[in-house]
Image: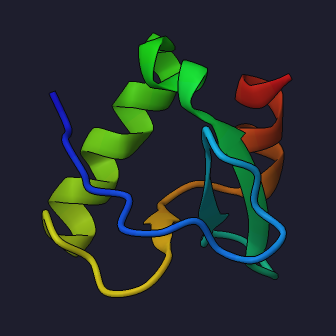
Amino acid sequence: MVRFLIRKVSKGIKEGHFVVVATQGWEAKRFIVGLGFLHNPEFLKLLKESEEEFGFFPEGVLEIPCRPDELRSILG
């Protein structure tokens, strides 16, 4: 399972949420995701792909290697 550390809450991000960026496609898109999605199998698959592509301890925001519309459909 992918593990990561949320070090601080950024301005404008509610507690219990984190930011990811969908990086594939014409334009990267930022998403605010609730911690509850860490139980979603489709989202966990994307996190695993992110770990394989970018490494276990990324610098800055968490990048997800998918198109924004794909991530939007998972997040509902």
Left/right of residue 23 with respect to residue 31 in the rendered view: left
Image: 57 above or below 36 = below
Locate residue 6, reporting x and y percent.
38, 58
Locate residue 73, reporting x and y percent.
81, 28
Question: Quarter of the image containing the C terminus?
Answer: top right
Q: Nearer the viewer, residue 42 or 25?
A: 42
The image's colouring method is rainbow
Q: Residue at x 50, y 76 (%)?
A: 61
Image: 18 above or below 73 = below
Q: Residue at x 65, y 46 (%)?
A: 15
Q: How many marks?
A: 0
Q: Residue at x 31, y 86 (%)?
A: 59
Identity of the residue furthest to the bottom in this view: 59
Question: Quarter of the image containing the N terminus?
Answer: top left
Locate residue 8, reporting x and y percent.
47, 69
Q: Residue at x 80, y 80 (%)?
A: 26
Q: Quadrant of residue 36?
A: top right
Image: 34 above or below 63 = above
Left/right of residue 5 with respect to residue 44 in the rendered view: left
